[in-house]
Amino acid sequence: MTQARRRAKLILCLRVVLTVIAWVAFIVYAHHLSHAYLGEIKSALGSKPTQVIAQIVVLSALVYFIMLSLPFLPNLGVRGVSVLAMWSIILVSGHQLSHEGFHQLRDILASASGEIGIYGLSLGALAYVLVLALPFVPGVEIGLLLMILFGREGVIVAYVATIVGLSLAYLVAQTVPYRITLKWMNKLGLSDATDNPKDAIDAIVGGRSATQGAAARLGNFLLSHRYLTLAVCLNLPGNSVLGGGGGIAALCGLSRQFHWWRYVL
């Protein structure tokens, strides 16, 4: 029986690895094709809203089929599909907002760097702090822009602004009442508790919810190494799919599982 279980686990792991490799290869190839035929795709879709809607649909379908192909993930119901659609809308909208605003801010700072110096740097730092604090809005490009345009001063300001922006998202999320947090957790199907919101949040973050298994064990492991997990997530390329720096910081504040001074360090 033990050998049969080990064999089953080995086959499951092999299947998961091969599935992930296949999806990565597909995404890389599709990304290459989309850039090669970017002009034709934009012409076919026409207006900007149509392009945004197409991105949302493609992203939602891609993630849905990826989740469907992984054996350890449950099939999404109506609520799961709705959450996935909301996530895609927020992610694509945040990316579009960041992309459009980046080019405008670049032009402003390019002229301001030589003319008004400290005021241009202050304007860029303020924009960076606010954008970085917003969930699902990539803001690292603004920080890189400050470094490129303002040199050493830009590097220092970008570093300080990064700490301020992430701390702002953390502190704002920490002020959200437990009742509001629990209400949305119930809507998303993350908790059925109604009496003690703090216990419900602690149970889910700690992996003590009703659903046990690999996900719960992974949650316990990540919680035991929460600050290392936070550092990895904040520096992970493409972390905008997790909410970006602002979204990750907000989750830390909502969970009440992170001490502020350790979080800042």
Image (cartoon, grey):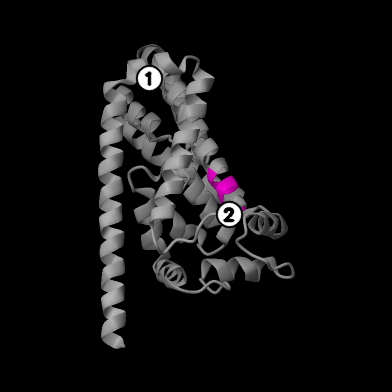
Magenta: main secondary structure equals: helix
Secondary structure of the residue carrying numbered label 2:
loop
Which SS class for mark 1?
helix
Relative to 217, is 190 on the left or the right? right
Span colored in magenta? 79-84
Q: Which mark is residue 77?
A: 2
Relative height, residue 144 to residue 250 (above, below) = above
- Residue at horizontal 29 percent and vertical 62 percent from the top: 15
Along the line of sight, the residue nearer the viewer: 118 or 131: 131
**Badge 1, how many Cα within 10 Å: few under 14, some, many 20+?**
few
The type of residue carrying mark 2 is: Gly
Which residue sits furthest bottom?
Answer: 1
Mark 2 to mark 1 CA distance (whole Å): 32 Å
Foreground pick, 265 / 40: 40
The part of the image, by quadrant, that contains residue 18 is bottom left
Location of mark 1 (residue): 41
Q: Quadrant of the N terminus?
A: bottom left
Going by the image, does 150 lie left or right of 128?
Answer: left
Q: Amino acid at mark 1?
A: Ile
Position of residue 83 measured from the top left corner of the image (x, y, whole percent): 57, 48
Residue in view at x 41 percent, y 19 percent? 103
Residue at point 47%, 59% (across, down): 261
Q: Is residue 71 above or below residue 160?
A: below
In this rendering, position of residue 71 left or right of residue 47: left
Front residue of 16 and 255: 16
Residue at 47% of width from left, 23% of height from top? Answer: 51
Placement of 261 over or under 62, stated as above or below: below
Labels 2 & 1 near each other (Cβ < 8 A): no
Magenta includes 197? no
- Residue 112: image quadrant is top left
